[in-house]
């Protein structure tokens, strides 16, 4: 039977962790009967833009606007199971879901929704918005539910109940698999095990030991990045923001092993708690396939004391900024020394041409 699993997020529920297993093991999954369609990893991101009617896809380079057609064609040509994974699909409207399911016909469409309790999800989502050059303060974040399917850093994409509601007319409940994020006492690879089980794959048959979930910034580092973003206007494109702000600056320099966690305002905590309860009501009224403990989707009644980003002092920000400048100087020196060593090393013309091509790919942000 032709089946396609659409893993649609939610954002900040371990999607990058799962994708860091799926894409390097694409060939191994194919051996196990699971096709991961597309020319490269970013075709799944581009497909999510196309499905959601985002004109930004036109700025993603030649052939970007064909990504969804390529994915659908490969799914149609594969006799077994296929997997498409990107967290931005979750913002699609009900009408867009209906079209997407029709595009994938005659394959039987299953939707995989990874989910976690909405308060932690909300705080992580704000951090991710900062990595996309947002300057919105946490107190002002998530105050609405957008009607625009192009919007992803908003309760439109974070509220599990809303996402399930938009899916209902396009995909039967029993083919929607809600995979609950593991808790602190679970094995580190438990999310992969649950996800692989939904796909019908033996989790041990796919190497996954080197994959790690994303780490978080602390409250001081997050507030520092928010303020820095006002001065990073030259990083215009999504690719530049992903390469330099998210990967190099935030994940590479501002994430610390002893990150101080934080909470939003009390009314935002209450809102997240209510959304979690409504999502549980939606699931309870449906016939969804739930993998994991639904109680983990509920915001706990008793929360540990944590600071708010607005409580960060100017002295703390100055100290963090000084540390960051020291790290940046060290990185500039390492890169300069590496470039100088390369210039001093003679290389055959063919090797030099290959290196030049590689550097051009890195500069464009192409994936391998």
Image: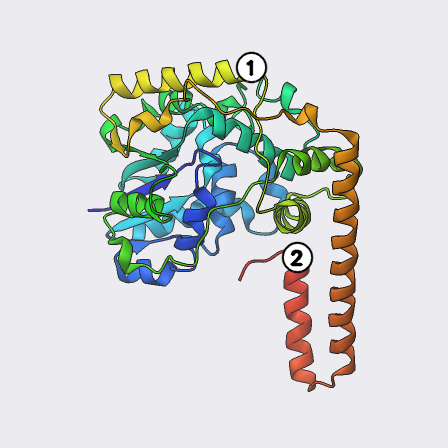
- Where is mark 2, residue-wise? 364
- Where is mark 1, residue-wise? 266
Residue 185 left/right relative to 123: left
Structural crowding at the residue carrying mark 1, measured as other residues with C-alpha within 10 Å and reported as few (<14), some (14–19) or many (≥20): few
Residue 207 left/right relative to 228: left
Residue drawn at (70%, 85%) of the image: 347
Which quarter of the figure has residue 228?
A: top right
Structural crowding at the residue carrying mark 2, measured as other residues with C-alpha within 10 Å and reported as few (<14), some (14–19) or many (≥20): few
Taking depth in this image into account, of 88 and 317 the one nearest to the observer is 317
Residue drawn at (66%, 74%) of the image: 355
Q: Which mark is residue 110?
A: none
* Residue 89: x %, y % from top left: 45, 35
Q: Of callouts 2 and 1, which one flags the residue occurring earlier in the amino acid sequence? A: 1
* Residue 308: x %, y % from top left: 63, 24
Vertical side of 53 occupied by 350: above or below:
below
Taking depth in this image into account, of 199 and 328 the one nearest to the observer is 328
* Residue 95: x %, y % from top left: 41, 24
Residue drawn at (36%, 52%) of the image: 74
Residue 338, visible in the rendered structure = yes
Which structural element holds mark 2?
Answer: helix
Which structural element holds mark 1?
Answer: helix
Which quarter of the figure has residue 190?
A: top left
Vertical side of 331 occupied by 299: above or below:
above
Residue 363 left/right relative to 57: right
How far, Cα to Cα, is label 2 from label 1?
Answer: 43 Å
Taking depth in this image into account, of 159 and 363 the one nearest to the observer is 159
Q: So how many labels did they put on this image?
A: 2
Residue 152, visible in the rendered structure = no
């Amino acid at each position: 039977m032709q089946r396609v699993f659409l893993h649609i997020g939610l954002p900040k529920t371990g999607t990058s962790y799962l994708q860091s297993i799926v894409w390097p093991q694409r060939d191994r999954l194919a051996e196990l009967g699971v096709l991961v369609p597309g020319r490269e990893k970013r075709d799944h991101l581009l497909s999510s833009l196309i499905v959601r009617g985002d004109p930004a896809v036109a700025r993603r380079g030649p052939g970007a606007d064909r990504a969804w057609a390529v994915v659908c064609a490969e799914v149609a040509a594969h006799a077994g199971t296929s997997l498409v994974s990107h967290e931005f699909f979750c913002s699609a409207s009900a009408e867009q879901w209906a079209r997407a399911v029709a595009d994938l016909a005659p394959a039987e469409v299953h939707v995989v929704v990874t989910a976690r309790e909405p308060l932690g999800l909300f705080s992580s989502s704000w951090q991710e918005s900062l990595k996309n050059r947002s300057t919105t303060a946490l107190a002002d974040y998530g105050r609405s539910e957008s009607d625009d399917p192009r919007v992803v850093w908003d309760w439109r994409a974070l509220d599990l109940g809303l996402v399930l509601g938009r899916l209902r007319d396009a995909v039967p409940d029993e083919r929607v698999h809600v995979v609950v994020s593991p808790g602190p006492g679970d094995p580190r690879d438990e999310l992969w095990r649950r996800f692989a089980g939904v796909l019908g794959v033996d989790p041990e048959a796919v190497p996954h030991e080197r994959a790690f979930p994303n780490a978080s910034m602390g409250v001081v580092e997050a507030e520092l990045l928010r303020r820095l973003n006002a001065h990073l206007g030259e990083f215009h494109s999504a690719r530049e923001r992903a390469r330099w702000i998210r990967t190099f600056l935030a994940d590479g320099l501002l994430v610390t092993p002893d990150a101080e966690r934080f909470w939003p305002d009390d009314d935002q905590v209450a809102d997240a708690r209510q959304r979690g309860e409504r999502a549980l009501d939606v699931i309870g009224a449906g016939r969804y396939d739930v993998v994991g403990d639904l109680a983990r989707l509920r915001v706990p009644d008793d929360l540990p004391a944590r600071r708010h980003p607005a409580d960060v002092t100017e002295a703390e920000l100055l100290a963090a900024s000084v540390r960051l400048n020291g790290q940046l100087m060290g990185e500039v020196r390492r890169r300069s020394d590496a470039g100088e060593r390369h210039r001093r090393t003679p290389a055959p013309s063919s090797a030099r041409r290959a290196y030049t091509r590689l550097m051009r790919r890195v500069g464009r942000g192409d994936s391998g």
